[in-house]
Amino acid sequence: MSHPLHCHGFGCRSADLINAHFIPQAFARQIRKSSGGSNTTASELRFTRGLQHGLYDNAILCADCDGFLGREYDDPAFKLINSLSVMVFSAPTFEIPNVDCELLCTFVLAVLWRCSVSSRYELSNINLIGYTNPARMVLWHAMPISNLRAYRVLCQRYYSRPGVEALYSLPIPTRFQLEGSEWRGYVLPLVGFGL
Ligand SMILES: [Zn+2]
């Protein structure tokens, strides 16, 4: 007996699913522009030039829920990150006043959540496990992001070098030391930034 697929959006039972991109297509377009047209779309598990606007899944979201995430997080986060990418930073550490950190954090969460609910092979190494449902509640404003106590976002600006601005990948699992503790997380490269 097969179970019909339905949308993973909060409280949504729609079975009318669309192609939902894990990372907004605007990033892939921007990266293609700066890389002169050729763009290697990749997850850690797959490299291809065949998906110029990035990887998507046709089994996770309906048009309404995909549109909601786009309006709330993807579109404003692209504008924000793209505006930061033209800034020149002279010191290794930098501070930009009045950046909407909550938007950056929820946007990264939206990317990770979409990857986490997907059963595509390319995303099989990304899983929020017990945080999948709380993350969805945060994205649909059913819970404040401050309730996700173990969730942190670090922002790194890559030094401008040929190829760096053109890096495109789905989140890559990583482990790192921070303030004496070992953290498990993901790196998400976006137009010259790593989040
Ligand atoms: Zn939906």
Image (cartoon, rainbow, N blue to C red):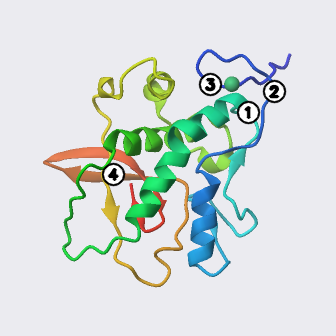
Name which residue lies at 43% across and 54% down.
80
- Mark 4 / mark 1, whichever is N-terminal: 1
- x 33%, y 51%: residue: 175
Residue annotated with mark 1: 63
Q: From where the camera sits, is residue 121 visible?
A: yes
Graded by Cα atoms within 10 Å as few (under 14), some (14 to 19) or many (20 or more), the crowding at tag 4 reads few
Front one among 126 and 79: 79
Give the Cα distance between marks 3 and 1: 10 Å
Do the numbered discs 4 and 3 sit on residues whose CB atoms are within 8 Å?
no
Tell me if the residue at label 1 has its CB under 8 Å from ligand 1.
yes
Residue at disc 3, CB closer than 8 Å to ligand 1: yes
The span from disc 4 to disc 1 (Cα, nearest Å) is 35 Å
Q: How many labels does the image show?
A: 4
Q: Is residue 112 above or below residue 38?
A: above
Look at label 4 and name its amino acid. Answer: Arg
Q: Mark 2 highlights which residue?
A: 16
* Left or right: where 69 falls relative to 5: left
- Which marked residue is nearer to the observer: mark 1 or mark 2? 1
Residue visible at 50% across and 54% down?
78
Is disc 1 placed on a helix, strand or loop? helix
Please identify, in this view, whether the residue under mark 2 or under mark 4 is nearer the observer.
2
Residue type, mark 1 in image: Ala
Ligand 1 location (quadrant): top right
Decide: marks 2, 3 in contact (CB < 8 A)? Answer: no
Disc 3 marks which amino acid?
Gly
CA distance for labels 4 and 3: 29 Å
Give left or right: position of 21 versus 2.
left
Q: Mark 4 points at which residue?
A: 175
Place of residue 16 in the rendered image (x, y in percent of width and height, measured from the top left):
81, 27
